Amino acid sequence: LLVSEQEEEYISNTLMKTINKLKKDKEQIAKDFEQEEECLTNDLSRKLMQLRQEKRELEETLESEQLSQVQHLQKKILKLEAEVVRKQEALTELQKRKKYRLRLCVDTTA
């Protein structure tokens, strides 16, 4: 009877130690998991912030390039408009000279 009580106590103690070790292991696994999750979250947050910054920089670069192109095209348009005006003036002058020459020819023949 005494041996069986000792055996029961030994088994009970062994089981309690095993249970306690498993609880500690479970707690450590939970802590490790939480730390890993936090590291991953922080890493992803940093990457997201970096991507947002890159996006802002790309948007600013694009906007700047578009503005530059618009300004270049506006200058080109102004030059072309000025050229059209000069050519219209030259054409008008040529038409006046032609009319004047025709009048001279008509006057000299008449």
Image (tube, rainbow, N blue to C red):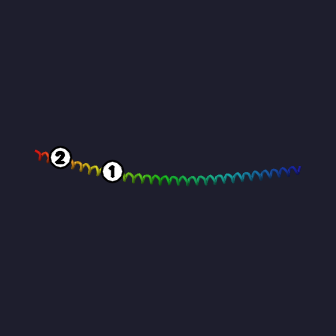
SS for dot 1: helix
In depth, the one of 72 and 24 nearer the eye is 72
Mark 1 or mark 2: whose residue is earlier in sequence: 1
Residue 105: x and y in percent read 14, 47
Q: Quadrant of the C terminus?
A: top left
Residue 61: x and y in percent read 45, 54
- At 42% across and 53% down in the image, what residue appears? 65
Residue 10: x and y in percent read 83, 52
Query: Disc number at residue 62?
Result: none
In depth, the one of 83 and 61 nearer the eye is 83
In depth, the one of 44 and 21 nearer the eye is 44
Report the residue marked by disc 2. 99
Tag in front: 1 or 2 = 2
- Outermost residue on the left side: it is 110
Report the residue marked by disc 1. 77
- Outermost residue on the right side: it is 1
Badge 1 local density, few (<14 within 10 Å), some, or many (20+)? few
Under mark 2, the amino acid is: Lys
16 to the left or right of 4: left
Under mark 1, the amino acid is: Ile
- At 31% across and 51% down in the image, what residue appears? 80
Badge 2 local density, few (<14 within 10 Å), some, or many (20+)? few
109 to the left or right of 52: left
- At 65% across and 52% down in the image, what residue appears? 33
SS for dot 2: helix
Q: Are marks 1 and 2 in contact (CB under 8 Å)?
A: no
**Alpha carbon separation for disc pair 1 and 2:** 33 Å
The mark tally for this picture is 2
- At 81% across and 50% down in the image, what residue appears? 12
- Outermost residue on the front side: it is 109
